[in-house]
Image (spheres, rainbow, N blue to C red):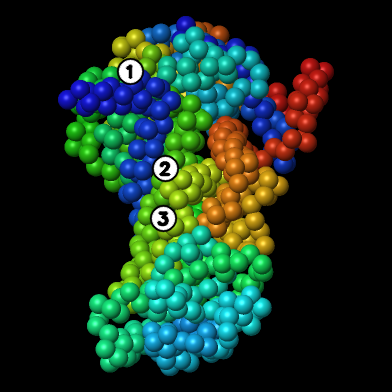
Amino acid sequence: MIKMKLLTEFYTFLFERNDFLHDLMLVVRKELLYIFRVPDVLIFSVLIPMVLYPVLMIGAGVYSAWVVSNQIKQAYRIAIPIEKSENLQLVLSVLKQTGRITTIEVKDPDEAVRKEKANASLIALPETGALEVHYEATSAGSAEPVKFIADTLDANENKILTKTLVDHGFTKHEVEPMSVRLRDINGISTSSRFPQIDARFAETYAPLLRFGALLAIFFLLSNARSAAVSPAVFMLAQERDLKTLKATLSLPISWNTLVLGKAVAVAFMALLSVFVNTVGVVLLGFFIVASLVMRLPAAKVTVDSLIQSISPSVIGLIATCSLLDILMSSSLLLFLCTLSRTTKEAQSLLIISSLAMVCVSIYALSPEHTLTWQSAFIPIVNLLLVIKACGMGTHTPIPVFITIAESMLLIYVAVHLTAFRLGQESFILSGETHLRWPWHKRMQKMQRMQKNANK
Amino acid sequence: MTISAEGVKKWFYDRKRGEFPAVDDVTFECRKGEIFGLLGPNGAGKTTTLMMITTILKPDGGKVEVNGFDVATNPEGARMQFGFVSSEAALYDLLTPRETLAFVGKLSKCPKEKLSARIDELIHLLDMTSFADTRCQALSTGMKQRVAIARALVHDPPVIIMDEPTSGLDVPTMQSVYQLVRQCKEMGKCVLFSTHIMSEAEKLCDRIGIINKGKLHALGTVAELKQQYSKADLEEIFLAVVGGNENNGS
């Protein structure tokens, strides 16, 4: 009861007694109530993405599966000891059936890896007989034990392996401990480095999935920017054309609050669109789950690897940057709207800018563009670079701080510029007067005309 | 006084004409419990003057105060003092009249408990009961205008500013608007009323200002103007002021 009372008092303090928040909430609520009744906005921001983007995401999933299956067909050179234990022989017999493994028999398999004669070494520990694969690690989670056999083979090959093991007198229970421990060759000896080529086995797919996740985030952000176009046009340019702008501007509210309220409502619509599009990502998730259930190769490893490489703080940072990006896009779109004279002009302007923002996403996604303190100063791109760096685990505090501070400043400036532009007669009386450029030297002309009138 | 305009100026830019004065040194005042009419032909500067008073446009010169609030230095304070009815009803088509009134009332910081009663009172007063919960897009022009007037009155402001509120209305609706304007006067409100219809100005307004080409040429009660220009009715006075002015201009 006391908690509820405190919460009610806090809400009252925040939204009833604080004029700015009270007005902001009112504008946001009214804009959302209004916009939810506009069929066009709902069609373009919610319904079309609901159908289109999941289809594209399924397409992306199918493509990823195709890439993965291609990678599975790559041949690996494995160095094995001349003297082979029984379980090692069994594993090799099955692996050879896949046609993706070539083996070289050497005295010291690890040495072969170091000399780059093999991609990895497969050995049985003399004490326990447990199998180990030695290779060069590429990610944080690589030293964890994985079911090498189960994860490397497909379902059919797995069946063959199980049958072979059972035929040789192993029970199903005994098949389970046949896990292989993946070990970084650098952990065994630091004498040499092994180049990052095909020997990555299961975690070959981790960067692929990480890239997929990044692609999904960028994709959703680009979509959010596009989804913001329709409400942005509606909230300013169309309001002017419907002649409601004058009445709105005469309402007892600060114009900055009015613009910010509209920007928040636009951002909310964009977020809604993102939410809807998340269905597409969830479908991609279903693809992964399905691959887990069907024991498609490497699925579990890649998911584990992805989870291990992204911490909650990184997820928080990605979420913050995404929200900032959406609010910034909404504010900028509203400002762009004020540069138009008609609704059609605003629509064209915003669609072009939205496409430009998609190009920015593609630019930021390309491998050569990374987050540095210099790139943190490039507006619009920098937030995407932070998200990308977070996904890749390469983010550093200073560029992140610069990016967030700069984005907040940009939102503040965009809101003020929009409110300023809203107050200019060339916007209010669009079609009746023309845009007055600063070089018109208005005051000088006024003085000249005043002098002439006096004469 | 409740509205005071002193030497107000506004310049516009046009590619053909360059800089030109839309409002030029206009001075007038509008008192409590008075209907002040701003009379002028189309393009005279009436709407621009009202837009400066309603803080939508910034004056390029002079000073405008609404109930003591300077529109240039304290626009937000000034906006709390008036309700504005424009020539177009300018309503959000997809909101109902009740929702529109609630939005403006809440923005004007009306107490929650009073707001609902106030909305019901206005709906009853303006005979809006039958369409109070219908979306504005389905309303007729007259109904929309009534909603626009209710919107201006919902926070019970001391000043009502009306920009040609009867344009496009049929005779019965015009009559109901006149009745409302008179009611506002009886409530002690200051009403600034712009129009280009002579009969309307003559019937309603206590004092009239005749504006043409951005300049205020005549100011006073109808009787004072008749005496000043030695004319029998307002139409003749208007023609004398505007026509004479145009002759001067040419």
B84, above or below A265, in the image: above
Name the disc covering residue B139, or none. none
Q: How crowded is mark 3: few (under 14 residues within 10 Å), some or many (20 or more)?
A: many
Q: What residue type is labelled 1?
A: Asp
Are circles 3 and 1 on residues that touch, CB within 8 Å? no
Are circles 2 and 1 on residues that touch, CB within 8 Å? no
Q: Is B5 on the left-hand or right-hand side of B178? A: right
Are circles 2 and 3 on residues that touch, CB within 8 Å? no
Q: Is mark 3 on a helix, strand or loop?
A: helix
Name the disc covering residue A274, or none. 3
The chain containing the residue under callout 2 comes to A
Q: What residue type is labelled 3?
A: Val
Residue under the point 40% across and 22% down = A19
Give the distance between the C-alpha atoms of the residues marked 2 and 1, in whole angstroms.
29 Å
Residue behind mark 2: A265
> Foreground: B224 or A243?
A243
Task: For marks 2 and 3, give the one nearer the viewer.
Answer: 3
Name the disc covering residue B156, or none. 1
Task: Provide residue A317's location: percent of width, then percent of height.
Answer: 49, 46
Can residue B81 be seen by looking at this rendering? Answer: yes
The mark nearer the N terminus, 2 or 3, is 2
